[in-house]
Amino acid sequence: GENVEQHPSTLSVQEGDSAVIKCTYSDSASNYFPWYKQELGKRPQLIIDIRSNVGEKKDQRIAVTLNKTAKHFSLHITETQPEDSAVYFCAAVVIGGAQKLVFGQGTRLTINP
Amino acid sequence: GAVVSQHPSWVICKSGTSVKIECRSLDFQATTMFWYRQFPKQSLMLMATSNEGSKATYEQGVEKDKFLINHASLTLSTLTVTSAHPEDSSFYICSAGSGSDTDTQYFGPGTRLTVL
């Protein structure tokens, strides 16, 4: 089955700097890669996603890149703000298959003012 | 947008009792619902996939007789933790999708279960 590895487990950056979180996946059939932000005690919130037919997607300060050959994808947050502090999870899923989201281990991002 | 609710939001129970958690899709029909468990400072782990009108598919290592799942309608799935023990204390989250070609899953707010 699918296995998703996420790094780093914790990340601390100065406000205004950029943050990058990386994930690798094992199943070449995976074709949809969402990123979630989760605040303590809350549900995961989808912040950006990318399908396997696209190499990069951007939404304001957030971007995701995908390298299908290497089977890795990354989340980039620019101009970080204190409200970006949260736990971020990557995930991989096979659309049209079992639809199961397989999550990475999570990254605790702290933005220092 | 699509909204998924869960009830209760938190529950405290005694060891040995059973607890039922409801997951509802409020404004769409969910052909598939998923149940996750999240321990403190850990990731979400899929427990089972629930399809309306059929038996749930459990992930390896998840006891189907302990975690009973019922998906009786296109808007409601329930998870019953039977004979709960302290090690079952966790954050249980459901998600719902509206079809096999849909990539987006909508998450419920979660249920915090504490077993004394």
Image: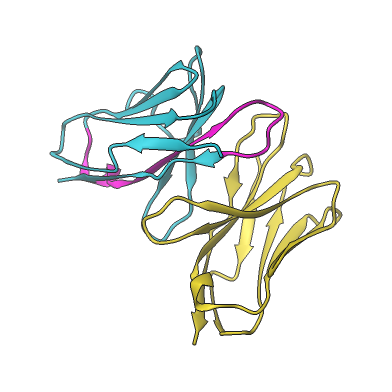
Chain colours: A yellow, B cyan
- Figure check: B107 above or below B42: above
Residue B16 image position (x, y, % from top left): 16, 32
Q: Residue at x 40, y 36 (%)?
A: B5
* In-image side of A13 versus B19 (left or right): right
Q: Residue shown at 37%/52% (left/top)?
A: B39
Q: Which is nearer the eye, B9 or B61?
A: B9
Residue placed most toward the observer, A77 or B28: B28
A38 sits to left or right of A55: left
Where residue A37 appears, x then y in whole percent?
A: 53, 59
User: What residue is drawn where x is 54% and y is 27%?
Assistant: B28
Q: Is residue B63 above or below residue A72?
A: above
Relative placement, left or right, of A90 versus A25 is: left
Residue A36 x/y as whole percent: 57, 55
Task: Name the residue at 60% across, 78% down.
Answer: A80
In magenta segment, residue B99: yes
In the image, residue A78 lies at what x, y percent? 68, 76
Does residue A81 appear to the left or right of B19 in the view shown?
Answer: right
Q: Is residue B45 magenta?
A: no
Q: Residue furthest top?
A: B53
Q: Is residue B77 above or below residue B109?
A: above
B98 or B68, nearer to the observer: B98
Magenta region: B84-105
- Quarter holding the N terminus of chain A? top right
